Amino acid sequence: MTAFWIIAAFIVITSFWLAADSHTLKIPADQRPYAFNNGAMAWFLSAVLLWPVTVPLYFSVRSNILRRRERARQYDLNVLADDIIKYKKLYDDGIISKSQYSRTIRKLLDIE
């Protein structure tokens, strides 16, 4: 009987962790945008009811979403670097003034 309670406690604790992690990282349980009812709550309930299926699925979905987010962030950094280089060339060629260049770079870096 003790083994049953240990396993039940393990399932409940890992299900709570899964819900907290999915809420923190905003990982939805389906293709719709993240909301509490299709994110943390859905992951928690499915983990409690179908733990052996849900936990591996969650880790797979989690890694795919985090990988996509990293690629998007990297793309944004590459676009930002290209824009900075473009405006630097315009400044060096005398097409824009120093104040225009500084203002544009501050706006690109979101400093203003």
Image (tube, helix red, strand yellow):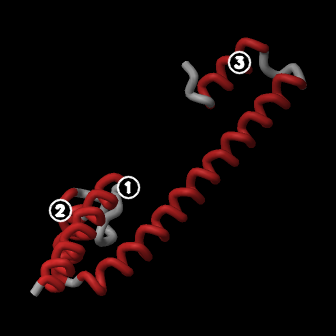
Split into 4 quadrants, where in the image is the C terminus?
A: top right
Residue drawn at point x = 21 percent, y = 84 percent: 50
Residue at which label 3 appears: 102
Residue at which label 1 appears: 25
N-terminal of the pair, mark 2 or mark 3, is 2
Residue drawn at point x = 19 percent, y = 71 percent: 12
Q: Which of marks 3 and 1 is in front?
A: 1
Contact, mark 1 vs mark 2 (Cβ under 8 Å): no
Residue drawn at point x = 63 percent, y = 52 percent: 74
Give the amino acid at mark 3: Ser
Q: In this view, does 30 lie to the left or right of 82?
A: left
Q: In this view, does 87 lie above or below 81?
A: above
Marks 2 and 3, how far apart at CA: 45 Å
Q: Residue 25 in the image: state x and y as whole percent.
A: 38, 55
Q: Is residue 83 left or right of residue 60?
A: right
Give the amino acid at mark 2: Asn
**Label 1: which secondary element:** helix
Identify which residue, 112 or 48, lies in the foreground: 48
Identify which residue, 15 or 54, lies in the foreground: 15
N-terminal of the pair, mark 1 or mark 2, is 1
Q: Residue 53 in the image: state x and y as whole percent.
A: 30, 86
Q: Residue 6 in the image: state x and y as whole percent.
A: 19, 78
N-terminal of the pair, mark 3 or mark 1, is 1
Picture disc at residue 5: none
**The quarter of the displayed image where residue 19 is located:** bottom left
Q: How crowded is mark 1: few (under 14 residues within 10 Å), some or many (20 or more)?
A: some
**Farthest residue in the right direction?**
93
Identify which residue, 37 or 11, lies in the foreground: 11
Q: In this view, does 49 lie above or below 15?
A: below
Q: In this view, does 18 lie above or below 46?
A: above
Marks 1 and 2, how far apart at CA: 15 Å
Picture disc at residue 37: 2
